[in-house]
Amino acid sequence: MTTELRRLRNYINGEFRDAADGRTIEVINPAVGEVYATSPLSGQADVDAAMEAAAAAFPAWRDSTPSERQKVLLKIADAFEERAEELIAAEVENTGKPTALVASEEIPPMVDQIRFFAGAARLLEGRSAGEYMEGMTSIIRREPVGVCAQVAPWNYPMMMAVWKFAPALAAGNTVVLKPSDTTPASTLLMAEIIGQIVPKGVFNVVCGDRETGKAMVEHPTPAMASITGSVRAGMQVAESAAKDVKRVHLELGGKAPVVVFEDTDIEKAVEDIAVAGYFNAGQDCTAATRVLVHESIHDEFVAALAKAASETKTGQPDDEDVLYGPLNNANQLKQVAGFIERLPAHAKVEAGGHRVGDKGYFYAPTVVSGLKQDDEIVQNEVFGPVITVQSFTDEAQALEFANGVEYALASSVWTKDHARAMRMSKSLDFGCVWINTHIPLVAEMPHGGYKKSGYGKDLSAYGFEDYTRIKHVMTSLG
């Protein structure tokens, strides 16, 4: 006797529909490694339909007032709160995350972020009107860019969708959003909720694989493409968008340095860093996974971190005291395990370094020491529950090691010396620097990096402005 799989469908122009050619993808629950649903493998016809719907809805949505858009976003936030249990269940099935942590660490920030952008809709700031040429008055208009093609990742399917659609809709744009092929369920539930509030065509969801995303970015309709994903994916998006000079917004990953000086409270730092490194199975672009510690406290710190790792639990969503769940998919499990298997001889696995159980995609909290700056695991994003540790001799070397990677999203400094913290925060080449903490984010502050971590900002007024364009209007006084 077999259980019938749930059938997920695209959301286009206010209705759910299968892919035009009927193709599907199997969706796997990573906590058990079993298929629980199918979702559309959308092709060009589906992308065309979604873009046509978004383009048709754009003029009316663009011309709505900021207060009208604010009311809509506030209704969406309220609806997400009211249906939180359904959203949590869908996200847990999507990702295998601990149920309690999705409830406490994802739903409240998501709702808060939507409400922030609801307020931002009514606070578009710009230079004041004035006369910069005799007999002429100049004014600045901020306008929505148009249809936005958005591609969300699988590490935070719901929250990253919010980071994309909320500022876009608040600014007066319409959206075609593609969730990851491994995590479409919660996004489609969000579409059901949003669809009851916004006009048809304003918000659309198209499911599929990389080719679907490629078709969205290359489509002539969108004025902007936004992606959160790998560096490789971001480069491909930027290359495709360049063909018709489409605006691009990229958030592409990180390799956050965690610089720990000798005056740090080791016990407190280890406790916080372990959480920031292992939360969400390390599948976070800002995760505290690359620790640089002063040589005078290196051995003590490594021993304490290894102990913290051994006490950190991974397991099924409803298990008690679980900090994180499985890796998102079989390929990601293989990638994380590969980094450990390829470690150089001088590296030492202090804790973990192995798969947990034979069901699902769980990996043990891992600590690796004895590493050199040019080692693969130091230079490349693991995106798993693996924390590496290197030692440094002084502030100059700490900066050299910290900045010596191709990513530049987030970083942290741990010290009681205020002047040193200020010097480090000035010189660290990362979009965010935390001091004596790591990973907190708020809706009012920007999130985004430099170098191969991409460009553009999520959250904050800066993220909102990314979804607008600037127009100069000059009028004669004569």
Image (tube, rainbow, N blue to C red):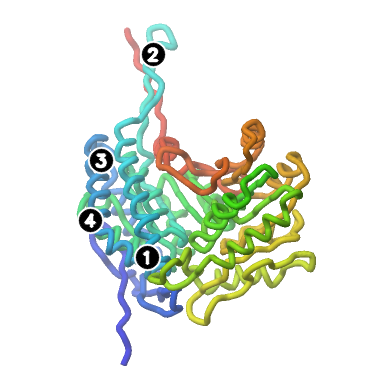
> Could you tell which of marks 2 and 4 lies nearer the N-terminus?
4
> Could you tell which of marks 3 and 1 lies nearer the N-terminus?
3
Q: Residue at x 41, y 52 (%)?
A: 149
> Could you tell which of marks 4 and 1 lies nearer the N-terminus?
4
Instruction: Kindly report the distance in space between the C-alpha atoms of the residues bearing marks 4 and 1.
Output: 17 Å
Judged left or right of residue 398, residue 39 is: left
- Label 2–label 1 contact, CB within 8 A: no
User: What crowding class fits label 1: few (fewer than 14 Cα within 10 Å), some (14-19), or many (20 or more)?
Assistant: many
Judged left or right of residue 395, residue 469 is: left
Numbered disc in front, either 2 or 1 = 1
User: What crowding class fits label 2: few (fewer than 14 Cα within 10 Å), some (14-19), or many (20 or more)?
Assistant: few
> Could you tell which of marks 4 and 3 lies nearer the N-terminus?
3
- Per the image, the residue denoted by label 1 is 99
Question: Looking at the rendered structure, which numbered label has been put on residue 82?
Answer: 4
Amino acid on which the number 2 mark rests in the picture: Gly
> Could you tell which of marks 3 and 2 lies nearer the N-terminus?
3
Numbered disc in front, either 2 or 4 = 4
Q: Is residue 373 above or below residue 420?
A: below
Q: Secondary structure at mark 1?
A: helix
